[in-house]
Image (cartoon, helix red, strand yellow):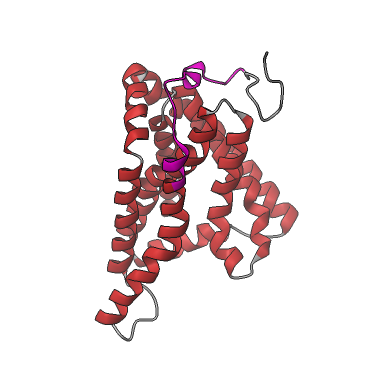
């Protein structure tokens, strides 16, 4: 009997039946490791351990130097890839099966994604009186200090690591259990929260206004996953969005 719950397996028109195949399963243990590596390892454990190295080499340091940031993100990148290898191999099958579709679909989705993000951002700033999200300001500041590192962070690290975590650990696990709307909600909400997490820890709760903006981006990335049937479609869309955003920021 078909499940008609909003969080269940009722099949919307954009749902990809290839992702419903019983052979495609992503276990809870690996999903938990992916999430823990990012939310606990990258955000807390790795910086804590690295701080001892930084202070040992530069006792006067009050913040991470560039080399330490490179080490931190490299460790997170490598460990994420290692944990997600089965997921990447699964998506590789989908990529080979739908190579042209995987290559072209993100470019079809991107214009609507970008225009929607602009509309949501303008509406949010009008309703809240806030300027740009703190995350965007932080990226702009980092770019003035280290443009090459910022480019690597936004067009390589973020598309790959964030898609493996949010569309992998969150979306893929619950999607493999037959759910559809629930993984979209969870992955998009967690994707939004991580982009305002620094501001929230500093008590800037006005950043909560930007949850719809980042959440909307997360939904489009889920659509790319569904339309292409593999994570590489979502990674490519994320890469395109961040690349265009960085190019426009540099030209502004």
- What percent of the width, then of the height, locates residue 166? 49, 42
Which of these two is toward me, 11 or 115? 11
Q: Is residue 144 visible?
A: no
| Outermost residue to the right | 127
Which of these two is toward me, 84 or 206? 84
Which of these two is toward me, 47 or 250? 47
Name the residue: 45% across, 44% down. 165
Q: Is residue 205 left or right of residue 16?
A: right
Check if residue 30 falls in the magenta segment: yes
Is residue 203 shown above or below 218?
below
| Outermost residue to the top | 1
Is residue 114 shown above or below 79?
above
Name the residue: 63% across, 22% down. 9
Check if residue 80 falls in the magenta segment: no
Q: Is residue 183 visible?
A: yes
| Outermost residue to the bottom | 60
Q: Is residue 1 left or right of residue 56?
A: right
Quarter residue 217 falls in: top right
- What percent of the width, then of the height, locates residue 118? 60, 43
- What percent of the width, then of the height, locates residue 216? 60, 40
Q: Which residues are magenta?
A: 13-32
């Amino acid at each position: 009997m078909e499940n008609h719950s909003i969080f269940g397996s009722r099949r919307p028109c954009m749902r990809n039946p290839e992702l419903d195949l019983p052979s495609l399963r992503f276990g809870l243990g690996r999903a938990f490791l992916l999430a823990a590596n990012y939310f606990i390892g990258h955000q807390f454990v790795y910086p804590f351990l690295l701080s001892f190295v930084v202070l040992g080499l530069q006792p006067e340091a009050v913040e991470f130097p560039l080399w330490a940031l490179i080490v931190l993100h490299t460790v997170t990148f490598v460990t994420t890839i290692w944990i997600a290898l089965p997921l990447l191999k699964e998506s590789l099958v989908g990529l080979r099966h739908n190579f042209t579709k995987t290559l072209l679909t993100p470019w079809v989705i991107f214009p609507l994604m970008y225009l929607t993000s602009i509309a949501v951002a303008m509406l949010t700033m009008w309703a809240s009186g806030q300027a740009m999200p703190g995350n965007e300001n932080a990226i702009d500041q980092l770019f003035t200090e280290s443009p090459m590192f910022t480019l690597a962070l936004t067009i390589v690290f973020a598309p790959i690591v964030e898609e493996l975590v949010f569309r992998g650990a969150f979306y893929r696990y619950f999607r493999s259990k037959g759910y559809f709307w629930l993984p979209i909600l969870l992955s998009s909400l967690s994707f939004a929260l991580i982009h305002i997490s620094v501001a929230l820890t500093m008590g800037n709760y006005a950043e909560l206004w930007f949850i719809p903006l980042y959440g909307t981006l997360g939904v489009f990335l889920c659509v790319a996953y569904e339309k292409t049937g593999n994570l590489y479609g979502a990674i490519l869309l994320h890469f395109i969005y961040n690349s265009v955003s960085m190019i426009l920021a540099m030209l502004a």
